[in-house]
Image (spheres, coloured by chain):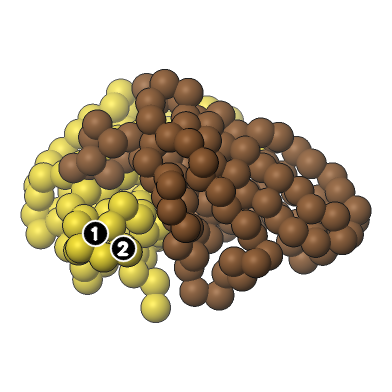
């Protein structure tokens, strides 16, 4: 199956600093990747759709200046949480859609990044 | 309003029991996926269903897609402690020519705990 690598798996930072999370598709090219946020014991909440070579599409209520997304290549998307605050602490998960199975719209997920802002 | 209603949200059962998780919507999905997620990990794809009325089996897990492609169910037979986790259904609305394409709509999730 398709593999999506997410790094780091856990990060602790001070309030006011910025944190970058990387999402890589290892064995396929992903023109579209997705970033989710998940609170404990809850489902995934889509934050934005990351499109290779163009601007990300953000969901309603998600601050694009707060959560910067860059999809510079077909295998890498990054999410930067700028000026992080304790309320940004959460589990962030990326996914990539395998373009060879478009009809099924299958997304493969990274292992997630636990962000703790002190 | 939740587009994809998943129930129950919590399920605590004894080893050997059977269970069913449901996902219902008023929308028609082009495909629907079921994922299982363990704490601190990302969701892992279990199955994808695309045809109305489709039934897929994965060992003790049986997945069904409704005839109208608006609902789906996951049935686990003789549950084991290793089945414990968060189960998520996610539907794709398919091509609409707009920004919704490619997105998955997730249900609220079902936290399953199987006690030895």
| Coordinates of residue B58 in the picture (x, y in percent) | 29, 27
Marking on residue B100: 2
Same chain for marks 2 and 1? yes
Query: In the figure, residue B67 lies in which quadrant?
Result: bottom left
Q: Is residue A117 left or right of residue A88?
A: right
| Coordinates of residue B90 in the picture (x, y in percent) | 35, 52
Judging from the image, what is the letter of the chain drawn in brown?
A
Local secondary structure at mark 2: loop
Q: Chain of mark 1?
A: B
Q: Are marks 2 and 1 in contact (CB under 8 Å)?
A: yes
For the residue pair A59 and B6, the one nearer the viewer reads as A59
Residue B92 in view, yes or no: yes
- Label 1: how many Cα within 10 Å (few below 14, some 14–19, many 20+): some
Relative to residue A51, is residue A109 depicted above or below? above
Q: Quadrant of the N terminus of chain A?
A: top left
Q: Quadrant of the C terminus of chain A?
A: bottom right
Local secondary structure at mark 1: loop
Query: In the figure, residue A104 lies in which quadrant?
Result: top left
Q: Please give the residue where the numbered disc 1 appears in the rendered image.
A: B93
Q: Is residue A27 left or right of residue B115?
A: left
Q: Residue at x 35, y 55 (%)?
A: B103
| Coordinates of residue A53 in the picture (x, y in percent) | 43, 47
| Coordinates of residue A92 in the picture (x, y in percent) | 62, 49
Q: Chain of mark 2?
A: B
- Please, which residue is most extreme toward the bottom here? B1
Comparing marks 2 and 1, which lies closer to the viewer?
2
Residue B44 in view, yes or no: no
Judging from the image, what is the letter of the chain drawn in yellow?
B
For the residue pair A20 and B78, the one nearer the viewer reads as A20
Relative to residue A61, is residue B91 depicted above or below? above
């Amino acid at each position: 199956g398709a593999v999506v690598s997410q790094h780091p798996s856990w990060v602790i930072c001070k309030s006011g600093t910025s944190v970058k999370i990387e999402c890589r598709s290892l064995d396929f090219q992903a023109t579209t990747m997705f970033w989710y946020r998940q609170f404990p014991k809850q489902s995934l909440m889509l934050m934005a759709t990351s499109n290779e070579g163009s601007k990300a599409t953000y969901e309603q209520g998600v601050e694009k200046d707060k959560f910067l997304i860059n999809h510079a290549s077909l295998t890498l998307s990054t999410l930067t949480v700028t000026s992080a605050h304790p309320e940004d602490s959460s589990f962030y998960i990326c996914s990539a859609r395998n373009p060879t199975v478009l009809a099924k719209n299958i997304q493969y997920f990274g292992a997630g990044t636990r962000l703790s802002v002190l | 309003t939740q587009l994809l209603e998943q129930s129950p949200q919590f399920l605590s059962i004894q080893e050997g029991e059977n269970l069913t998780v449901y996902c219902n919507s008023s929308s028609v999905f082009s495909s629907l996926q079921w994922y299982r997620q363990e704490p601190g990990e990302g969701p892992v794809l279990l199955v994808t269903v695309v045809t109305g009325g489709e039934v897929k089996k994965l060992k003790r897990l049986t997945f069904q897609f409704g005839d109208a492609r608006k609902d789906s169910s996951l049935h686990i037979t003789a549950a084991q402690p290793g089945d414990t986790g968060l189960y998520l259904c996610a539907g794709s609305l398919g091509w609409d020519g707009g920004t919704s394409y490619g997105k998955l709509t997730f249900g609220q999730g079902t936290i399953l705990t199987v006690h030895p």
